Amino acid sequence: MKPSSRPRASSRLSDSVHHQLSMYALAASAAGVGVVALSQPADAKIVYTPAHARIAPNHTIPVDLNHDGKIDFNIKDTWFSTTTVDEDIIGSIAVIPARKGNGIAGYARSLHKWASALPAGVRIGPKSPFSSGRKVMVSGAIDIGTTTVGYCGGPWKNARHRYLGLKFTIQGKIHYGWARLNETCAKNGENTALLTGYAYETIPNKAIIAGETKGPDVITVDSGSLGTLAAGRK
């Protein structure tokens, strides 16, 4: 007797995600471009968005993790002169929650609350050290009156393929996500960064693995072709 086979249970995306993917399909059809997401299984639970957005001094990059038209976080690069006799130029790159209830994985040390530069493979979820408010990724400075060599410090200094751990809400429920960036500290202490992708878990309160972009549970959205990633703004 052959053993009876049972259909594999599958989890379903939320109505909001189905709506979003339908909107992507409509936009792609109108623009004559394809959406990678539509070729993925319907039970995908991680929505990944590739990106290529440079974060330059005195510019801000908004991040809408779930593409609902509401900004979840802003990554801001500041670089400005002081008014001292020997002119100082100082700056930082920081990530700032755009809505109440959103949080960033990090820690407090010295005068700053730092955003952790997580390696790939780290689990981001309920047990992560989240807190609200602005978190500094890296800071820099140069004293024009005494030197031409700047200083940079912080967990994101010259980081490559590191991840922000992010917590945000969808319809009042907590979701977890990440944003992947590279950071560069120049000799004059000026910092720049490159946002290369971000993702979130569609199931509330479920942890996500930093850097997980492939597999049966991942759906990929090509936001660049649809223009859903906002350009950096001053």
Image (cartoon, grey):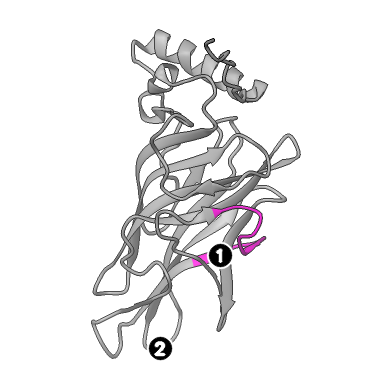
Q: Residue at x 44, y 17 (%)?
A: 38
Residue 113, percent from left and from top? 57, 72
Report the residue marked by disc 1: 135
Q: Quadrant of residue 80?
A: bottom left
Residue 205, percent from left and from top? 68, 44
Measured in 3D between alpha carbons, the distance from the residue under mark 1 to the one under mark 2, in whole angstroms, is 30 Å
Of residues 35 and 204, the one nearer the viewer is 204
Q: Residue at x 43, y 21 (%)?
A: 40
Report the residue marked by disc 2: 85
Of residues 145 and 189, the one nearer the viewer is 189
Q: Quadrant of residue 31?
A: top left
Write down the region rendered in magenta: 124-136
Q: Is residue 31 above or below residue 125?
A: above
Q: Residue at x 55, y 15 (%)?
A: 3
Q: Is residue 15 above or below residue 164?
A: above
Q: Quadrant of residue 111?
A: bottom right
Q: Residue furthest right?
A: 172
